[in-house]
Image (cartoon, rainbow, N blue to C red):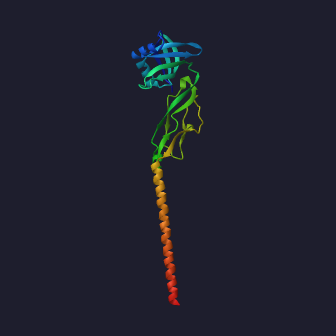
Amino acid sequence: MSSELKLEAETGRDHGSRSARRLRRSDKIPAILYGQGSEPLSVTLDRLKFRATLNAAGPNAVITLDVDGTDYLTIVKNMQRDPIANRVTHVDFMLIDIDQRLTVDVPISLVGDAVVVRQEGAVVQQQMMTLTVEAPAGNIPQQFEVDISEMSIDNPVRVSDIAFGSGVVPQAEEDALIAIGQRSRASIAAEEEADVEGEESDELGEGAEAGEDAADDADAGEDAGDNS
């Protein structure tokens, strides 16, 4: 479930790329607060505190943003990152009500050991990395843990296998695949080779039986000639 945390932010920053670069060099992150018909508000975050907040509660956490002493209930709507350093360069906060229904993407984590899949010579392939759900702001899942210990090639994991909390509605079909057992090329090749060897063995066996039958027929002919 979502965790409600508090994070401080400051107003009064300058705009523009030069100002943003100065902020980032001082371990600050430019951000914007918007929503519910209010004017967008430009704020500044402490990078380390923001990172600690996300690490503690996840990207879908409800955050009380303390802006110069005034509290705003928010959720992170978008984050921009540096493509090389992967550092957060800008954050969009959206104002919310605690009972408001939101549509968010929730990460999916596979847990357990898919023993049957391995015994079938297959590997687990995760088909869905996140699941879009609609949920009350105060009851947003941070992650779905999906048990794969009972799955097999003929019994994949689907959206219907997830236990959803109160008010949480998936935006995908119930039979949508989350994880499947996928045969490896090596196991398929080994099975095909075994089938070929089995067919060759059957053919050899049939040839041997035919040879024995021919020999028996020849012996019977010789016996008939001797008797005449």
Above or below, comparing residue 145 to residue 223 in the picture = above
> x%, y% of residue 111?
46, 38
Task: In this rendered view, identify the residue nearer to me: 202 or 2.
Answer: 202
Task: In this rendered view, identify the residue nearer to me: 203 or 103.
Answer: 203
> x%, y% of residue 52?
42, 22
Report the residue at 53% width, 17% height from top. 73
Residue 174, by quadrant, is: top right
Q: How many marks?
A: 0
Asked if one can make out residue 27 in the rendered structure from this viewpoint, the answer is no
Report the residue at 45% width, 53% height from top. 190
Farthest residue to the bottom: give it.
228
Asked if one can make out residue 156 in the rendered structure from this viewpoint, the answer is yes
> x%, y% of residue 98?
56, 20
Report the residue at 45% width, 22% height from top. 88
> x%, y% of residue 4?
49, 21
Above or below, comparing residue 129 to residue 43 in the picture = below
